Amino acid sequence: MDKEDYAAQFSRAMRTGGLRFTRNEAKKFIIAMTKTIAEGLTRDRKLIVSNFGAFEVLKIGSKIINSPRGDKKKFFMPPTDVIKWHPSGKIRSHAKSTAVSEEEFRALVGHAYLEPAPIVTTPSPAAPKRKNPYEVKIRLLTKGKEYLADEGSPISRLAKILINEIRAGKAEKVEIRPGKEISEIIYIASSSPLPSRRIPKISHDIIIEKIKTMATVDPADPKLLILPLSETQRILVRPRLSQFGEILLLEMVK
């Protein structure tokens, strides 16, 4: 039923009730009624019509929707307002559902369609992965970065060992250099390297983060990080980037 049919039926109903209403008058009444409903929803976002129902403006948040064309594309739908109508009990009583006859049910159901069973493929067994002799599995039981503040953790003990080795004069510089799978701690004394120490790549970022949390900003140069050992000794912390990650250089400065 469109607006013309509704106006004709509305005018007939008004004449049946004893009011003389032409089709044009009924059309003007419908236009005025819909305009009033729109203005009320715009102003109050809710409109109640007795014995008819309630109109309400609802906010729908943004979401990702599928393309209506069926091409499996997804689109972003911004937040929008929709109008919902809640019919009254009197309206619901005029629109009750009726039982469907057996003939109508068969016409609606039609022929049964059985979906084909999904094809289950068994993946071929993958080749055994070559074991890394330096691989170490670490499971952190603490939350966030609380392990950095744990002075008894292996990472904290390793950081203290590096600082004490520089303080004892074993090396003038210590460089923590990442590799593709293994990271190295290189000791440099008088511009010549000493035997290095290897650590798992998974521990590389953790040890660098631990040393950075121990360092403070140099008062003379805010761009530098230092580890103060005494009034006359301090370790300069210099980070820089490389192909496989961050390099950290520790150098004794007096």
Image (tube, grey):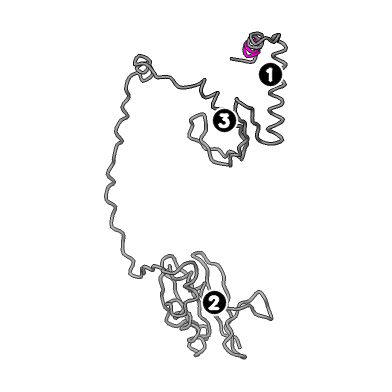
Q: Give residue 60's quadrant in the image.
A: top right
Q: Is residue 7 magenta?
A: yes
| Element carrying mark 1 | helix
Identify the residue under disc 1: 30
| 3D distance between C-alphas at marks 3 and 2 | 70 Å
Q: Is residue 137 left or right of residue 7?
A: left
Q: Please state the extent of the stretch shown in magenta in the rendering.
A: 5-10
- Label 1 and label 3: CA atoms lie apart by 20 Å
Residue at 70% from the left image edge and 19% from the top image edge:
31
Foreground pick, 5 / 54: 54
* SS at circle 3: strand
Q: Which residue is mark 3?
A: 86
Sequence order check, earlier mark of 3 and 2: 3
**From the image, which quarter does the N terminus lie in?**
top right
Which of marks 3 and 1 precedes in the sequence? 1
Classify residue 225 as left or right of residue 137.
right
Mark 1 vs 2: CB contact within 8 A: no
Residue 219 occupies which quadrant of the picture?
bottom right
Q: Is residue 205 magenta?
A: no
Up/down of 196 relative to 71, above or below: below
Residue to which mark 2 is pinned: 249
Callout 2, which amino acid? Answer: Leu
Q: Earlier in the sequence, mark 1 or mark 2?
A: 1
